[in-house]
Image: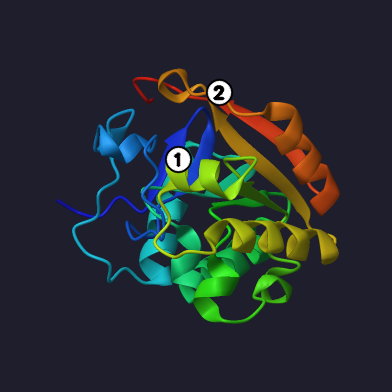
Amino acid sequence: MSNVLVYTLDGKIYINLTNHCTNECIFCLRNDKSDVKGQELWLDNENSTAQDVIEQFEKIYQTTPSKEIIFCGYGEPMLKLEVLKEVAIYIKNKLPQCKIRINTNGHANFVYKRNIIPELKGLIDEFSVSLNGATKEEYNELSQPKFDEAYEEVKKFIKACADENISVVASVVEGYKGRHLDIKKCEQIAKDLGAKFRVREWIENGY
């Protein structure tokens, strides 16, 4: 079985760079299934290069041209930062009309011990960052991060995006098995950090 690095969902193209993640979110689709609409997203290995991604992207774009490309799969895409940058450069050069978005948990600056946002300015049009809670305790319960100060790092990451004038959306998953967040408080946190806000309703059976 070959690695599915590029897949489609609702007419958009998604890029699945890695299965590694710094969270173990209790609501993550990959806990219950291995695919998105029949497209297997568990990778055989983590050795794929930017060229591997680009080759799959070119084939899919021919049959499913999309105005929006999203880095999002069964892992945290920013953990493959150099591959991500190389692929984004290719897309921007070849398809400047396409919007590029990254769906991220917002841990990248902590992982790399530097602010990586300026490196992505001009390449990434929008970040969607998983806020997933009005408090650290709420975030930890839902996201199960692998380091202690994850919630603060997420908020700092959102602000760093806003400070670079890159569009950033703070998102929350609402309704997981009857759990309800303080949506107004989450929205206020997003606003205070300079972000837009989005509520993602939990999808019980995934896609």
Residue located at (84% from left, 48% from top): 192
Q: Quadrant of the C terminus?
A: top left
> Percent x, y for residue 29?
35, 35
Q: Mark 2 highlights which residue? A: 180
Residue located at (76% from left, 44% from top): 190
* 150 or 115, nearer to the observer: 150
- Vertical order, 130 against 197 (above or below): below
> Percent x, y for residue 174?
55, 26
Q: Which mark is residue 3?
A: none
> Percent x, y for residue 178?
45, 18
- Vertical order, 151 against 34 (above or below): below
Q: Mark 1 highlights which residue? A: 142
Q: How many marks?
A: 2
Q: Quadrant of residue 196?
A: top right
Residue 43 visible in the displayed image: yes
Spatial CA span between label 1 and label 2: 11 Å
Residue flagged by tag 1: what amino acid is it? Leu
